[in-house]
Amino acid sequence: MKRKKLLFATLIILLVWVVTHISYTLIDGLISYKEKADLAVVLGSKVNEDGTLSKRLTQRLECVLALYKDKQVNHIMVSGGFGKEGFYEGDKMKTFLIAHHVPDSIIIVDNQGNNTLATVDNSLIIQDSLKATSILVVSQYFHLTRTKMLYHKRGFHQVYSASPYYFEVRDIYSLFREFVAFYTSWVGH
């Protein structure tokens, strides 16, 4: 009987932990900060097989465009890897921004941002070379809490976030994936 009670209590604690973390992730990710930042970092996402940007990636870029037009960011780093579709995400993102009248001189391309940690590390090198004191991360809302935690673990604390108001059914899966990834990254990196 004691074993069943202990198991039940453990499951309740785990459920409360998951719900609390996901609730925090939702709130943290859906609040777009209005602080001005020296560097915006846009995390990559899928480029379609025909070379067009996925809806998710387009929405991230529309978000950073709005920040740029509001003079909220000085430089924009676009970061992603080489996708299985055969394109560098960073190059495609830069092309999009230039087509929307963002000057080439303020865009930094990181085609080695194959994952969130690589993007964080690469952006800190850029942040250092620009002598930037603040970073604003742009990604989907569910991705921002972990990304900011990785910056904090690297000793960089002036990090803010913004996300597009774009939602998909797969976000439910992504919220649970990010829960696991958060604690894996927290312990491992």
Image (cartoon, rainbow, N blue to C red):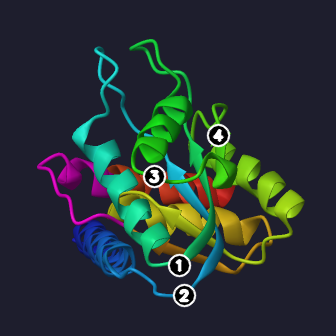
Amino acid under disc 1: Gln
* Residue occupied by mark 2: 35
In this view, the mark in front (3 or 1): 3
Query: Which is more N-terminal, label 3 or label 2?
Result: 2
Q: CA distance from mark 2 to mark 1?
A: 7 Å
In this rendering, would 8 be left or right of 142?
A: left
* Residue occupied by mark 3: 101
Query: Which is more N-terminal, label 1 or label 2?
Result: 2
Q: Quadrant of residue 23?
A: bottom left
In this view, the mark in front (4 or 3): 3
Query: Which is more N-terminal, label 4 or label 2?
Result: 2
Question: Are dots 2 and 1 in contact, CB under 8 Å?
Answer: yes
Q: Quadrant of residue 54?
A: top left
Please tell me which residue is depicted at 23% across the width and 42% down the height of the picture. 55
Q: Is residue 170 magenta?
A: yes
Q: CA distance from mark 2 to mark 4?
A: 23 Å
Q: CA distance from mark 2 to mark 3?
A: 23 Å
* Residue occupied by mark 4: 109
Amino acid under disc 2: Glu
Label 1: few (<14), some (14–19) or many (≥20) C-alpha neighbours in 10 Å:
many
Q: Is residue 107 visible?
A: yes
* Residue occupied by mark 1: 72
Amino acid under disc 3: His
